[in-house]
Image: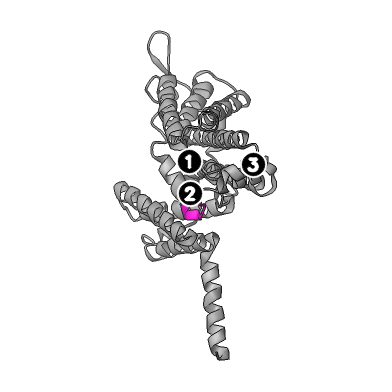
Amino acid sequence: MTASSENRTGTVGFWRRWWAQPASRALVAFLLVLALGCVFHADGAFFKIGTHRDALRQASVYGLLACGMTLVIISGGIDLAVGSILALAAVCFARFSIHWGWSPWAAVPAVLVIGAACGAVSGGLVAGFRIQPFIATLAMMVMARGLAKTVSGGMKVSTAVQQADGSYQYVPVPEVFRWIDSRILGGNVSVVSLILLGCVALAWVVLARHRWGRQLYAIGGNEEAARLSGVPVARAKVMAYVASGLLAAVAGICQAAQEQQGDPEAGAGYELTAIAMVVIGGTNLMGGRGGMGLTLLGVLTIGYLEKVLSINAVPEASRLMLTGLIVVMAVLAQRRRSG
């Protein structure tokens, strides 16, 4: 074999190894979306700073759900209830803050506890009663949606507060709503986007540095081997669903602040987008492999794709179909690499 042939073989081998890495494929997907935006820029709208700011802002709520979903998927599970928990958290936060006049120091922790409790129920069904994650979280999805409609009375919880005589009186939007929905750094960065980055950083530290994070990888890789190695499987899995519910509650708080109301119908279908973000980032749906950095790439990819389609007036139905197609393609790519 000549030197040139060896060089070509080495180069091909290098690129094959590079492409086999989930981060490489996720990065290429993100760059392709950016290239798509540069081509279909809607008369220069894609090149404006406001477009990028809004894209990150709109993707942040989905990204918070994707953070929790990543923890669950790495452990070998799935959480279909995050959209409904988001709705429950949104109506509870609006009810506590707007109608009952609670301070943020009481309303926010109460909503986080509600989200964590929903996650604990899902985790208990999965780890304690050995119910399939799909079924357990499907049940929680229906239950949380019902609770959201019960708390809200079947209507949006807005600044129109019903009085004793049946009339409605409008009250000011709580300051915490305005702060969460505000922008800083000259109006170029949304607070919601910073909340997402903070949650991503915290989850990354947990997965990369904390014992519990390593336990989740071990459980997702081989649950029986992890159990025989002394890993507290049940506790670790329950905590993954608790974290997912907690982050869904954070997303619900942000959603309520952005809409300035609590909508019991909010979050419908959000679980699909969250799963798409996790999968397009390269986290394996079978568990045991993935990471928060990959999920962040997936969040940016789907977020910018949604924005590019939006500024080009692509109908929502087409966007939903494209999201489903992306999930299928990403899963097929994972199967080829694992095979």
Q: Nearer the viewer, mark 3 or mark 1?
A: 3
Identity, as a three-letter code, of the amino acid under mark 3: Leu
Q: Disc 3 or 1, which lies upstream in sequence?
A: 1
User: Where's the N terminus, which quadrant?
Assistant: bottom right
Residue at image position (48%, 40%) is: 78
Q: Give the x, y percent position of residue 219.
A: 59, 44
Give the distance between the C-alpha atoms of the residues marked 1 and 2, in whole angstroms: 8 Å
Q: Secondary structure at mark 2?
A: loop
In the image, which disc is placed on residue 186? none
In the image, which disc is placed on residue 228? 3
Q: Secondary structure at mark 1?
A: loop
Q: Which residues are magenta?
A: 278-285
| Residue that label 2 marks | 285
> Do callouts 1 and 2 mark residues in contact (Cβ within 8 Å)?
yes
Outermost residue toward the bottom in this view:
2
Q: Give the x, y percent position of residue 216.
A: 60, 43
Identity, as a three-letter code, of the amino acid under mark 2: Leu
Q: Nearer the viewer, residue 17 or 326?
A: 17
167 vs 171, left or right, is left
Q: Disc 2 or 3, which lies upstream in sequence?
A: 3
> Do callouts 3 and 1 mark residues in contact (Cβ within 8 Å)?
no
| Residue that label 1 marks | 78
Q: Residues within 10 Å of mark 2 (few under 14, many from 20)?
A: many
Q: Is residue 161 above or below residue 89?
A: above
Residue 51 seen from this side: no
Q: Give the x, y percent position of residue 38.
A: 42, 64
Residue at image position (43%, 45%) is: 273
Residue 145 seen from this side: yes
116 vs 161, left or right, is right
> Do callouts 2 and 3 mark residues in contact (Cβ within 8 Å)?
no
Q: Secondary structure at mark 3?
A: helix
280 magenta-colored:
yes
